Image (cartoon, rainbow, N blue to C red):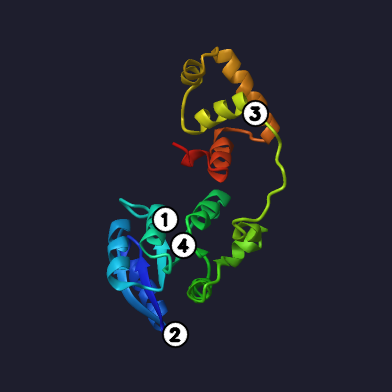
């Protein structure tokens, strides 16, 4: 039996290119297409594909949210994330949301084909370009991590608030401390964690689930 695939991408030319690629394979059947996250979820309910090739950057409901929702609608549907982003945070977030594979748009077409076939057989697949960068550790969602540096509760609070965009003054007001004290906690926490700027703080926050908390 052929693997039933739904293509989700907001660019028609990309969808058509993917359709031509996939339908040229004897073991793959494209059963539908979707231009945004909401349509993707509607088509998952209607078509019951085995695999969804999911673009990450779609309007409305983005690929990450659509991946989570797909797993809620039908946990048997495998999602292969298709993205141009090589950043560790994106990979972790998509795999954590339930994606079975992560493929780079800039990689050879064979990467996507391998990912679809792996996902359809219940396996996980990571783009070889990422594996080459020692990213195979991403595939073990429950793999134990070596203990990291310890920061104080106050340093953690300051960095969490920094990650979601609060200014030093706003942090000081919420925690009832001085702006100078905020700066000290921020500097100490970043030094202990080896973070060099706000981008590093945001990335650390994503990887450690800080941004998912209410």
Residue with the mark numbered 1: 68
Q: CA distance from mark 3 to mark 4?
A: 33 Å
Q: CA distance from mark 1 to mark 4?
A: 12 Å
Q: CA distance from mark 3 to mark 1?
A: 32 Å
Disc 1 packing (10 Å; few <14; some 14–19; many ≥20): some
Residue with the mark numbered 3: 189
The percent position of residue 125, horizontal first and vertical second, equals: 56, 68
Q: CA distance from mark 2 to mark 3?
A: 52 Å
Q: Earlier in the sequence, mark 1 or mark 2?
A: 2
The residue sitting at 59% across, 29% down in the picture is: 156
Quadrant containing the N terminus is bottom left
Q: Work out whether residue 212 or residue 199 is closer to the camera in this orientation and state it.
A: 212
Q: Quadrant of residue 33?
A: bottom left
Q: Are marks 3 and 1 in contact (CB under 8 Å)?
A: no
The percent position of residue 135, horizontal first and vertical second, equals: 64, 58
Q: Earlier in the sequence, mark 4 or mark 2?
A: 2
Residue with the mark numbered 4: 81
């Amino acid at each position: 039996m052929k693997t039933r695939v739904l293509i989700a991408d907001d660019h028609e030319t990309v969808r058509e290119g993917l359709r031509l690629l996939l339908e040229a394979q004897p073991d793959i059947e494209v059963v539908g297409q979707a231009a945004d996250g909401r349509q993707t979820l509607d088509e998952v309910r209607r078509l019951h594909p085995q695999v969804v090739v999911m673009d990450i950057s779609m309007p409305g409901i983005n690929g990450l949210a659509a991946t989570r929702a797909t797993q809620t609608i039908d946990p048997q549907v495998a999602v292969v994330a298709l993205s141009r982003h090589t950043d560790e945070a994106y990979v972790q977030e998509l795999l954590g949301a339930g994606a079975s594979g992560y493929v780079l748009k800039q990689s050879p077409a064979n990467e996507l084909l391998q990912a679809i076939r792996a996902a359809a057989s219940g396996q996980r697949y990571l783009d070889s370009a990422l594996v080459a960068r020692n990213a195979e550790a991403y595939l073990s969602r429950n793999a134990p991590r070596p203990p990291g540096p310890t920061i104080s509760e106050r340093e953690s609070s300051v960095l969490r608030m920094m990650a979601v965009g609060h200014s030093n003054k706003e942090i000081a007001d919420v925690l009832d401390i001085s702006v100078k004290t905020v700066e000290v906690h921020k500097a100490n926490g970043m030094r202990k964690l080896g973070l060099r700027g706000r981008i590093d703080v945001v990335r650390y926050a994503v990887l450690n689930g800080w941004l998912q908390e209410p």
